[in-house]
Image (cartoon, rainbow, N blue to C red):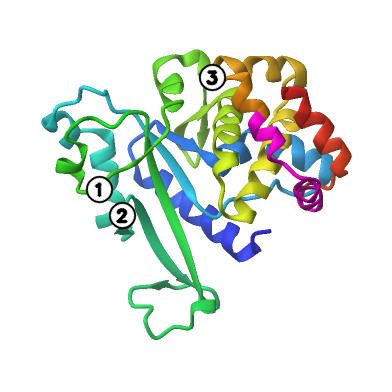
Amino acid sequence: MYKEFETKTSYKYLQEVIKALQEPICILGGWAVFFHVNEKFQKAQGRPYLGSRDIDLGFHLDKNSSIEQMKNSVLAKSLDILQNKLNFKSISFRLLKEIHTETEEELTNSKTIPSHNIFQMYVDPLVDFIPKNFKEVFKFTPADEPLLSFAFENQDYREELEEFNKKLLLPKPELLLATKLNAMPQRDKEHKKTKDICDIFALLWYSGRNVRDLSSNVPQFISKEKINKAIKSITNEDYEKASIQLNHTPEEIKRVIEILK
């Protein structure tokens, strides 16, 4: 699904990002799933769990944050480090770094490089709330994930671990499941939908939690209607593509995911 070069490069820069930012650092998306499931997946299959191409970071902002509070927020400090210390380029609400796929060097001017030799790696900062004057302060409109507020406001919905000598915050598996189920019906790229299916199955099967207990906790974050809509959007072909990545049969993947219904 993703080339090994892409996930290895993303993991390398994930380490750099974590080492550079102020802790605790909230990790979302595919790398959060990786940290939850990799130990048990690797023990069962003798290989690491699927890596991610992008790095998703979560930030808390109070919905009533003032301009001064936003300027002094962890988000503002992190964006400054990512752009001015780690040299990511701001592209709308995303941060981009281009890497040469053969030399593995960072590209500062890619205009003369063939596109197939360029890996575009993104860091995506997500916020739980978008305060009124956000664009005035940051000059872009961010991607938001309101479900993230559960992890920031209640320690019961997050886990803390140390990785690369820094404290990380991960949303608990049931909360990550909710974010994946929420996003999947809107996916416009086939590989992202396949990765969502893989992540949903892996969180259910390899996070070390009882599958039915874990499934029963998801509706506190999103409605059964949304859960069922997401599951209904998965085709037999989707299950087959996920099967290739997971080394589980399409039937088993479908059976486990449908426990969420």
The residue identified by callout 1 is: 140
Q: Is residue 52 above or below residue 162?
A: below
Q: Quadrant of residue 88?
A: bottom left
For badge 2, the amino acid type reads Ser
- The quarter of the picture where the N terminus appears is bottom right
Question: The residue under label 1 is which amino acid type?
Answer: Phe
Mark 3 nearby-residue class (10 Å; few <14, some 14–19, many ≥20): some
Q: CA distance from mark 2 to mark 3?
A: 29 Å
The residue nearer to you, when weighing 178 against 77, is 178
The x, y position of residue 215, in whole percent, is: 70, 20
Q: Is residue 44 left or right of residue 3?
A: right
Residue under pointer 3:
221
The C terminus, quarter of image: top right
Q: Which residues are magenta?
A: 229-245
Q: Are marks 2 and 1 in contact (CB under 8 Å)?
A: yes
Horizontal and vertical percent for residue 188? 56, 52
Mark 1 to mark 3 CA distance (whole Å): 28 Å
Spatial CA distance of label 2 from label 1 is: 6 Å
Q: State the residue lying farthest toward the left.
A: 68
Q: Amino acid at mark 3?
A: Phe
- Mark 1 in CB contact with mark 3 (< 8 angstroms): no
